[in-house]
């Protein structure tokens, strides 16, 4: 089984010893698409990182054509930013816990924020304001847990099982606030639909749940639900014209339960991104999640069946280049597959063996539902995610398996009203046993040419670069947002 290092060990991603499950089905097309989605996310992030925050006009004069070093963060070619780090944190939780555990997910995001866990530089150098605020709030709430359970250290409170956390009255893992609908929830999404790709209903439901931990608006939740459905359908080989059909949502309505998509997301699902002139037609690679969703789908729609052309077009929109490209890469990678992503980009990608290994485990464990997942096939759960993110508007559900903070349990638990989770007859396969003896796994450190100084502070410090003062101030410690991010929706924050 894959073992992730402790955040206190200060192990860089390329130093993590990777293993692969023994799985004879790795030649299946679905496997290639799962790996493609995760690698596609990271490749898009790495390609866009060097020009993050650059405007469209600049990129017309200086288009990105390949992995390149320097730029906004002074990274090496192939290194990635917060988009990939948070996606890997989410994936590491799903793999380690073998279920959707929102408390563990927030812990791993916190590890990245405070200690550089799964960061390509060993520290958190790029973080959006909304995500930072949510993680600061989570740390404050963890102090309450420390008091309740008499935990002496951070390690102790981090090890609390989800069930104990949920036993604390009025404790909520939704650490965002009303109106937060930045693209940070969407940029990290892929591990959820990839882990649950055999159960589209759960994939869609948990995708929305993953958003609300850090982004409190229903628009962010529904953007993730819709995009997760697209990724699941792509992994299962639905043709591109169906994925991009204005009827996709209606054709897959059973995956979404009784709660309709928010009108803004429904507009996107009905083709608002189909504008042939792209930027000149109003497509923007900005931080508002609807803009980001439209931009990624626009790039996919007009990419002429080329991952390379689509991801570069996403970057050329400017502004939040790495995130737009990472969102594009999740869906395009799931559709085109790993082999269709340019080989030289895959080879240059930092810690590519680690990311590939994580994709293997998401695929392998996603084929083998845990007890919790099997129970969910026999249940109907109702809940909703409110825009105002209250902490106390809960009720008990009198059902066999209920939902509390987004997790199924066998007891009556706190839930929300509104959505319906229905068992899906689609994409079911016989359960296979996990092979504990990994005869064909690799156990050697990943070789790399990167020489990153791990002695620098892990607590929010910036990498040493020769950036101008303007570039340094673009996102000092990740807490400030350029003014162009709020020209349309002044309240919405980037991440």
Image (spheres, rainbow, N blue to C red):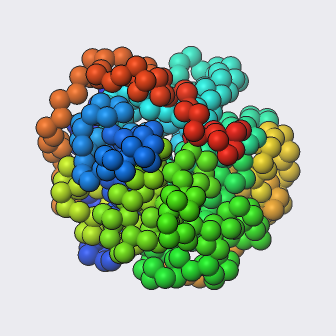
Q: Please say if 301 is above or below 485.
A: below
Q: Please say if 81 is above or below 243.
A: above
Q: Please say if 270 is above or below 140.
A: below
Q: Picture quarter containing residue 410?
A: bottom right
Write the residue at 50% across / 63% down: 278
Work out whether residue 9 can be spotted.
Answer: no
Write the residue at 24% across / 43% down: 68
Quadrant of the drawing holding the C terminus = top right
Percent x, y for residue 469?
Answer: 40, 19
Percent x, y for residue 200?
Answer: 57, 71
Percent x, y for residue 358?
Answer: 34, 53
Percent x, y for residue 384?
Answer: 77, 57
**Residue 214 shown left or right of residue 10 in the figure:** right
Work out whether residue 489 can be spotted.
Answer: yes
Write the residue at 15% across / 40% down: 448
**Residue 297 shown left or right of residue 290 in the figure:** left
**Residue 352 shown left or right of residue 290 in the figure:** left
Write the residue at 41% across / 27% down: 471
Residue situated in front as seen by the camera: 264 or 389? 264
């Amino acid at each position: 089984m894959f073992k992730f290092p402790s955040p206190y060990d200060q192990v860089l991603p390329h130093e993590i010893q990777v293993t692969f499950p023994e799985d004879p089905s790795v030649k299946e097309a679905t496997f290639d698409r799962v790996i493609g989605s995760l690698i596609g996310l990271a490749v898009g992030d790495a390609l866009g990182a060097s020009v993050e925050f650059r405007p469209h006009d600049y990129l017309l004069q200086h288009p990105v054509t390949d992995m390149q070093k320097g730029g906004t963060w002074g990274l090496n070619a192939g290194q990635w930013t917060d988009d990939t780090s948070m996606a890997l944190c989410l994936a590491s939780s799903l793999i380690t816990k073998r279920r959707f555990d929102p408390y563990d997910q927030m812990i791993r995001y916190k590890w990245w924020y405070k200690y550089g866990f799964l960061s390509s530089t060993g520290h958190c150098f790029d973080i959006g304001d909304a995500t930072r605020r949510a993680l600061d709030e989570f740390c404050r709430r963890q102090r309450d847990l420390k008091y309740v359970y008499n935990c002496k250290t951070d390690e102790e409170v981090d090890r609390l099982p989800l069930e104990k956390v949920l036993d604390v009255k009025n404790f909520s893992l939704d650490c965002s606030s009303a109106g937060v609908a930045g693209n940070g929830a969407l940029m990290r999404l892929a591990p959820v639909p990839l882990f649950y790709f055999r159960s589209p209903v759960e994939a869609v439901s948990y995708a929305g749940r993953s958003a609300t931990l850090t982004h409190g608006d229903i628009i962010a939740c529904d953007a993730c639900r819709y995009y997760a459905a697209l990724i699941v359908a792509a992994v299962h080989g639905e043709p591109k014209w169906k994925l991009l059909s204005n009827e996709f949502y209606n054709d897959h309505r059973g995956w979404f339960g009784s709660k309709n998509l928010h009108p803004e997301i429904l507009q996107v699902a009905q083709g608002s991104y189909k504008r042939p002139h792209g930027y000149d037609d109003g497509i923007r690679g900005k931080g508002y999640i609807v803009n980001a969703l439209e931009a990624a789908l626009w790039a996919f729609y007009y990419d002429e069946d080329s991952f390379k052309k689509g991801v570069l077009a996403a970057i050329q929109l400017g502004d939040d280049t790495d995130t737009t490209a990472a969102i594009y890469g999740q869906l395009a990678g799931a559709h085109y597959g790993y082999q269709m992503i340019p080989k030289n980009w895959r080879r240059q990608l930092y810690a590519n063996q680690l990311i590939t290994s994580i994709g293997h485990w998401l695929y392998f464990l996603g084929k083998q539902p845990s007890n919790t997942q099997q129970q969910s096939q026999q249940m109907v759960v109702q809940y909703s995610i409110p825009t105002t993110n209250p902490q106390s508007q809960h009720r008990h559900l009198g059902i066999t398996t209920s939902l509390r903070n987004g997790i199924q349990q066998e007891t009556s638990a706190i839930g929300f009203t509104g959505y319906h989770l229905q068992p899906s007859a689609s994409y079911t396969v016989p359960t296979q046993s996990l092979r504990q003896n990994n005869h064909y796994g690799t156990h050697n450190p990943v070789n790399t040419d990167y020489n990153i100084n791990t002695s620098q502070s892990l607590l929010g410090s910036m990498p040493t670069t020769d950036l101008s003062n303007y570039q340094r101030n673009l996102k000092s410690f990740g807490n400030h947002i350029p003014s162009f991010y709020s020209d349309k929706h002044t309240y919405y924050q980037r991440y």
